[in-house]
Image (spheres, rainbow, N blue to C red):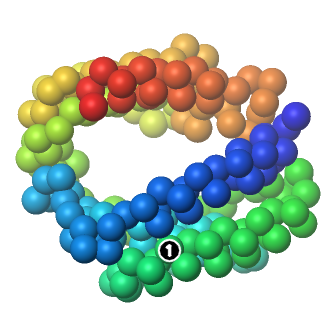
Amino acid sequence: MNTREYFNQCFKAEVPKFVRVLKAVPKDQSAYRPHPRSMSAGDLVWLLASELHDACELVDHGQVSYVQKPAPELAESVSAYEKNASALKRRLAKVKDAGWKKITTYRAFYESFKGIDLDRSLGRYPGAFLALRGSLDFLPNHDAEFMKVAKGQPAEAVLIAGADHIFGVLDPAHSHADRAIEVTTAWLRRTL
Protein backbone atom coordinates (compact mmCIF):
# COMPACT_ATOMS: atom_id res chain seq x y z
CA MET A 1 0.00 0.00 0.00
CA ASN A 2 1.42 3.38 -0.95
CA THR A 3 0.89 6.71 0.81
CA ARG A 4 -2.01 7.80 -1.41
CA GLU A 5 -3.85 4.52 -0.85
CA TYR A 6 -3.16 4.71 2.88
CA PHE A 7 -4.48 8.28 3.07
CA ASN A 8 -7.64 7.29 1.19
CA GLN A 9 -8.18 4.34 3.52
CA CYS A 10 -7.73 6.51 6.64
CA PHE A 11 -9.84 9.34 5.26
CA LYS A 12 -12.70 6.95 4.44
CA ALA A 13 -12.57 5.48 7.97
CA GLU A 14 -12.14 8.79 9.82
CA VAL A 15 -14.77 11.01 8.19
CA PRO A 16 -17.78 9.24 9.78
CA LYS A 17 -16.05 9.41 13.17
CA PHE A 18 -15.37 13.12 12.78
CA VAL A 19 -18.98 13.73 11.73
CA ARG A 20 -20.26 11.96 14.86
CA VAL A 21 -17.95 14.02 17.08
CA LEU A 22 -18.83 17.31 15.36
CA LYS A 23 -22.56 16.60 15.61
CA ALA A 24 -22.10 15.85 19.32
CA VAL A 25 -20.92 19.40 20.07
CA PRO A 26 -23.88 20.98 21.91
CA LYS A 27 -25.28 24.03 20.07
CA ASP A 28 -25.23 26.05 23.27
CA GLN A 29 -21.53 25.26 23.79
CA SER A 30 -20.12 26.43 20.46
CA ALA A 31 -18.48 29.40 22.22
CA TYR A 32 -16.73 27.12 24.76
CA ARG A 33 -12.98 27.71 25.09
CA PRO A 34 -10.83 25.60 27.45
CA HIS A 35 -8.53 28.64 27.78
CA PRO A 36 -9.12 32.32 26.89
CA ARG A 37 -6.56 32.13 24.07
CA SER A 38 -7.93 28.84 22.73
CA MET A 39 -10.10 28.55 19.65
CA SER A 40 -13.79 28.08 20.48
CA ALA A 41 -15.51 24.76 19.81
CA GLY A 42 -17.55 26.36 17.01
CA ASP A 43 -14.45 27.88 15.42
CA LEU A 44 -12.67 24.53 15.58
CA VAL A 45 -15.56 22.77 13.80
CA TRP A 46 -15.45 25.48 11.11
CA LEU A 47 -11.67 25.16 10.79
CA LEU A 48 -12.00 21.41 10.14
CA ALA A 49 -14.68 22.04 7.50
CA SER A 50 -12.63 24.81 5.90
CA GLU A 51 -9.49 22.66 5.74
CA LEU A 52 -11.35 20.05 3.71
CA HIS A 53 -12.41 22.80 1.30
CA ASP A 54 -8.76 23.90 1.09
CA ALA A 55 -7.76 20.29 0.36
CA CYS A 56 -10.22 20.27 -2.56
CA GLU A 57 -8.60 23.47 -3.87
CA LEU A 58 -5.20 21.85 -3.54
CA VAL A 59 -6.29 18.83 -5.59
CA ASP A 60 -7.97 21.03 -8.23
CA HIS A 61 -5.38 23.79 -8.59
CA GLY A 62 -2.20 22.59 -6.89
CA GLN A 63 -2.36 25.45 -4.40
CA VAL A 64 -4.45 26.83 -1.58
CA SER A 65 -5.52 30.45 -1.27
CA TYR A 66 -6.16 30.44 2.46
CA VAL A 67 -8.77 32.98 3.47
CA GLN A 68 -10.02 32.85 7.02
CA LYS A 69 -13.77 33.43 7.28
CA PRO A 70 -15.85 33.81 10.42
CA ALA A 71 -17.49 30.61 11.60
CA PRO A 72 -21.18 30.25 10.76
CA GLU A 73 -23.70 28.55 13.05
CA LEU A 74 -22.58 25.13 14.29
CA ALA A 75 -25.07 23.16 12.15
CA GLU A 76 -23.88 24.97 9.03
CA SER A 77 -20.25 24.16 9.88
CA VAL A 78 -21.06 20.47 10.33
CA SER A 79 -22.97 20.47 7.05
CA ALA A 80 -19.98 22.14 5.33
CA TYR A 81 -17.67 19.48 6.79
CA GLU A 82 -19.86 16.70 5.34
CA LYS A 83 -20.16 18.45 1.96
CA ASN A 84 -16.42 19.16 1.74
CA ALA A 85 -15.52 15.62 2.85
CA SER A 86 -17.72 14.21 0.05
CA ALA A 87 -16.17 16.58 -2.47
CA LEU A 88 -12.65 15.64 -1.39
CA LYS A 89 -13.47 11.93 -1.53
CA ARG A 90 -14.62 12.31 -5.16
CA ARG A 91 -11.47 14.22 -6.05
CA LEU A 92 -9.14 11.78 -4.31
CA ALA A 93 -10.58 8.92 -6.34
CA LYS A 94 -9.17 10.61 -9.45
CA VAL A 95 -5.71 11.50 -8.10
CA LYS A 96 -2.89 9.34 -9.44
CA ASP A 97 0.35 8.55 -7.64
CA ALA A 98 2.41 11.05 -9.66
CA GLY A 99 0.07 13.91 -8.80
CA TRP A 100 -0.09 12.84 -5.18
CA LYS A 101 3.60 13.45 -4.62
CA LYS A 102 3.68 16.96 -6.07
CA ILE A 103 3.96 19.60 -3.38
CA THR A 104 4.20 23.22 -4.41
CA THR A 105 4.44 26.13 -2.03
CA TYR A 106 3.82 29.69 -3.05
CA ARG A 107 5.04 33.04 -1.82
CA ALA A 108 1.71 33.71 -0.06
CA PHE A 109 2.34 30.73 2.23
CA TYR A 110 5.62 32.19 3.44
CA GLU A 111 4.23 35.72 3.60
CA SER A 112 1.52 34.46 5.97
CA PHE A 113 4.25 34.09 8.62
CA LYS A 114 5.12 37.81 8.59
CA GLY A 115 4.63 39.41 11.95
CA ILE A 116 4.62 36.15 13.88
CA ASP A 117 7.07 36.26 16.77
CA LEU A 118 7.42 32.59 17.70
CA ASP A 119 9.53 33.22 20.81
CA ARG A 120 7.04 35.75 22.17
CA SER A 121 4.03 33.58 21.32
CA LEU A 122 5.60 30.46 22.80
CA GLY A 123 6.59 32.39 25.91
CA ARG A 124 2.94 33.38 26.46
CA TYR A 125 1.53 29.90 25.76
CA PRO A 126 0.67 28.25 29.12
CA GLY A 127 0.10 24.70 27.86
CA ALA A 128 2.26 21.65 27.32
CA PHE A 129 4.66 21.85 24.36
CA LEU A 130 6.09 19.15 22.09
CA ALA A 131 8.73 19.88 19.46
CA LEU A 132 8.97 16.89 17.10
CA ARG A 133 11.43 16.78 14.22
CA GLY A 134 13.48 14.46 12.09
CA SER A 135 17.28 14.29 12.28
CA LEU A 136 17.43 14.90 8.50
CA ASP A 137 15.12 17.94 8.59
CA PHE A 138 16.41 20.67 6.28
CA LEU A 139 15.39 23.40 8.75
CA PRO A 140 17.85 24.43 11.46
CA ASN A 141 17.33 22.77 14.83
CA HIS A 142 16.19 25.34 17.39
CA ASP A 143 14.62 22.90 19.84
CA ALA A 144 16.95 23.82 22.72
CA GLU A 145 15.95 27.49 22.34
CA PHE A 146 12.25 26.53 22.17
CA MET A 147 12.59 24.59 25.43
CA LYS A 148 14.11 27.63 27.15
CA VAL A 149 11.32 29.93 25.93
CA ALA A 150 8.39 27.56 26.56
CA LYS A 151 6.61 28.52 29.78
CA GLY A 152 4.12 25.64 29.79
CA GLN A 153 5.00 22.27 31.22
CA PRO A 154 5.84 19.70 30.25
CA ALA A 155 7.99 20.95 27.40
CA GLU A 156 9.69 18.21 25.44
CA ALA A 157 11.80 17.93 22.28
CA VAL A 158 11.97 14.64 20.39
CA LEU A 159 14.29 13.90 17.48
CA ILE A 160 13.38 10.98 15.21
CA ALA A 161 16.55 9.50 13.72
CA GLY A 162 16.59 9.26 9.94
CA ALA A 163 13.37 11.25 9.44
CA ASP A 164 13.15 14.30 7.19
CA HIS A 165 10.99 17.43 7.55
CA ILE A 166 7.75 15.56 6.72
CA PHE A 167 8.81 12.24 8.29
CA GLY A 168 9.11 10.53 4.90
CA VAL A 169 5.35 10.36 4.32
CA LEU A 170 5.77 10.55 0.55
CA ASP A 171 8.04 7.51 0.52
CA PRO A 172 6.40 4.55 2.30
CA ALA A 173 9.63 2.54 2.15
CA HIS A 174 11.39 5.20 4.25
CA SER A 175 8.48 6.61 6.22
CA HIS A 176 8.86 7.56 9.85
CA ALA A 177 5.22 8.66 10.10
CA ASP A 178 4.24 5.75 12.37
CA ARG A 179 7.02 6.68 14.80
CA ALA A 180 5.95 10.34 14.75
CA ILE A 181 2.36 9.27 15.50
CA GLU A 182 3.51 6.92 18.30
CA VAL A 183 5.61 9.67 19.93
CA THR A 184 2.82 12.24 19.62
CA THR A 185 0.13 9.86 20.91
CA ALA A 186 2.23 8.85 23.91
CA TRP A 187 2.97 12.50 24.67
CA LEU A 188 -0.73 13.43 24.45
CA ARG A 189 -1.64 10.58 26.82
CA ARG A 190 0.90 11.85 29.34
CA THR A 191 -0.06 15.50 29.08
CA LEU A 192 -3.85 15.57 28.65
| Of residues 116 and 77, the one drawn nearer to the viewer in this rendering | 77
Vertical relation: 27 (above or below) 72:
above
| Of residues 69 and 142, the one drawn nearer to the viewer in this rendering | 69
Give the residue at x 88% y 53%: 98
Residue 23 x/y as whole percent: 47, 66
Identify residue type, mark 1: Val
| Of residues 164 and 79, the one drawn nearer to the viewer in this rendering | 79
Question: Where does label 1 land, which residue?
Answer: 78
Residue 135 x/y as whole percent: 51, 20
Vertical relation: 147 (above or below) 119:
above
- 128 left or right, relative to 76: left
Vertical relation: 159 (above or below) 32:
above
Res 135 visible: no
Vertical relation: 130 (above or below) 84:
above
Q: How many marks?
A: 1
Give the residue at x 44% y 80%: 75
